[in-house]
Image: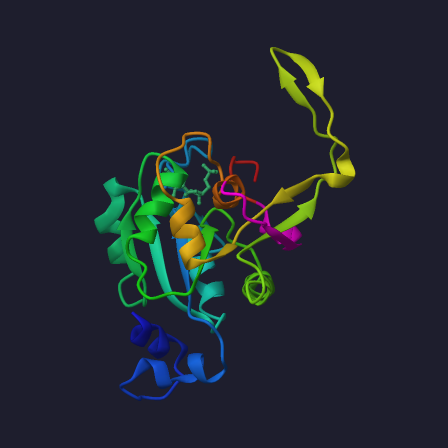
């Protein structure tokens, strides 16, 4: 996979030994990315899996891949797609240097399916295909911060006041200054992510949550207004 990514970047020479290429010469760690695209998109109701919905002539999935291809430190990409659409999406991705895995019932399950195909990475990014407009600078920022952190997430301040509600009644109003909306890609040392992904937990909605529960500090860097998640037809 490393070699095929090098061909994609097209600037790392034709040396047979991947570890002697530009990725290592810069002193950078090997970073893989899991692109989770196995959601059904039921809230979008487009009739096809959300990741295959097109915006501006390209699927959400392809937007993500095109941005990631400009981030040279990403050396392997695993795309996790709905099991029922494995053939179709694999065909659509033919010729691109990615591995394809069949997703699971929850996002968390899909991340684990992707993890199983990652080989040799020191750092792993997990990115939602539903966030097709995240700029490359956010990927770079997350990877940069992994130099001295085990886990890094991009986030933006929330503009609304957020309340906890149970049975139609407010039970708490957290102080807004301390709240952020979390985006992807989320970055982790590979061993940290693998260890945190041990076992099924239906409450988990992002990977950082697993790492937090393991007592590991999760660093927050600036996300982007363009990092919003496409969920409904309005988006
Ligand atoms: O459902 P949610 O909006 O949290 O989905 C976020 C991302 O997780 C999307 O890119 C979606 O394709 C992916 N996902 C997945 N497998 C699932 C559910 C969601 O890969 N079973």
In terms of image quadrants, where is residue 180?
Answer: top right
Q: Nearer the viewer, residue 92 or 156?
A: 156
Which quarter of the rendering shows the C terminus?
top right
In the rendered view, does 108 fall on the left or right side of 55? Answer: left
| Residue 44 visible within the image | yes
* Circle count: 0
Whether 91 is among the magenta residues is: no
Tell me: residue 12, above or below residue 153: below
| Ligand 1 falls in quadrant | top left
Which residue sits furthest left? 87
In this picture, residue 207 sits left or right of residue 161: left
Q: In the displayed image of the protein, which residue is found farthest to the front? A: 215
Tell me which residue sits at (47%, 52%) in the image.
127
Residue 59 visible? The answer is no
Looking at the picture, how far across and down is residue 99, in whole percent? Answer: 29, 60
In terms of depth relative to the viewer, which is nearer, 83 or 170? 170
**In front of the other: 65 or 194:** 194
Q: Position of residue 11 (x, y in %)?
A: 42, 84
The magenta segment is 214-228
Q: Determine the residue positioned at 41% across, 30% down.
A: 202
Q: Position of residue 36 (x, y in %)?
A: 40, 48
User: In the image, is residue 226 part of the stretch drawn in magenta?
Assistant: yes
- Residue at 29%, 52% in the rendered image: 116
Location of residue 151 with respect to 106 vertically, above or below: below
**Display coloring:** rainbow
Quadrant location, the N terminus: bottom left
Query: Residue 170: where, in percent of width, then height?
Result: 70, 16
């Amino acid at each position: 996979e490393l070699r095929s990514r090098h061909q994609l970047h097209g600037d790392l020479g034709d040396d047979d030994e991947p570890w002697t290429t530009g990725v290592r010469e810069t002193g950078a760690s090997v970073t893989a990315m899991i692109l989770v695209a196995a959601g059904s998109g039921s809230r979008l109701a487009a009739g096809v899996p959300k990741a295959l919905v097109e915006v501006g002539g390209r699927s959400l999935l392809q937007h993500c891949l095109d941005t990631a291809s400009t981030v040279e430190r990403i050396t392997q990409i695993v795309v996790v797609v709905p099991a029922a659409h494995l053939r179709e999406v694999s065909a659509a991705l033919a010729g691109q240097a990615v591995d394809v895995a069949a997703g699971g019932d929850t996002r968390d399950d899909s991340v684990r399916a992707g993890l199983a195909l990652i080989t040799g990475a020191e750092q792993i990014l997990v990115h939602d295909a539903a966030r097709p407009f995240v700029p490359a600078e956010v990927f770079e920022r997350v990877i940069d911060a992994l130099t001295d952190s085990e886990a890094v997430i991009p986030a933006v301040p929330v503009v609304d006041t957020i309340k906890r509600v149970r049975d139609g009644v407010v039970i708490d109003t957290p102080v807004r200054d301390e709240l952020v909306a979390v985006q992807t890609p989320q970055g982790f040392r590979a061993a940290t992510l693998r260890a945190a992904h041990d076992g099924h937990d239906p409450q988990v909605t992002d990977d950082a949550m697993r790492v937090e529960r393991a007592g590991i500090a999760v660093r927050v860097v600036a996300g982007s207004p363009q990092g919003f998640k496409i969920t409904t037809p309005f988006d």
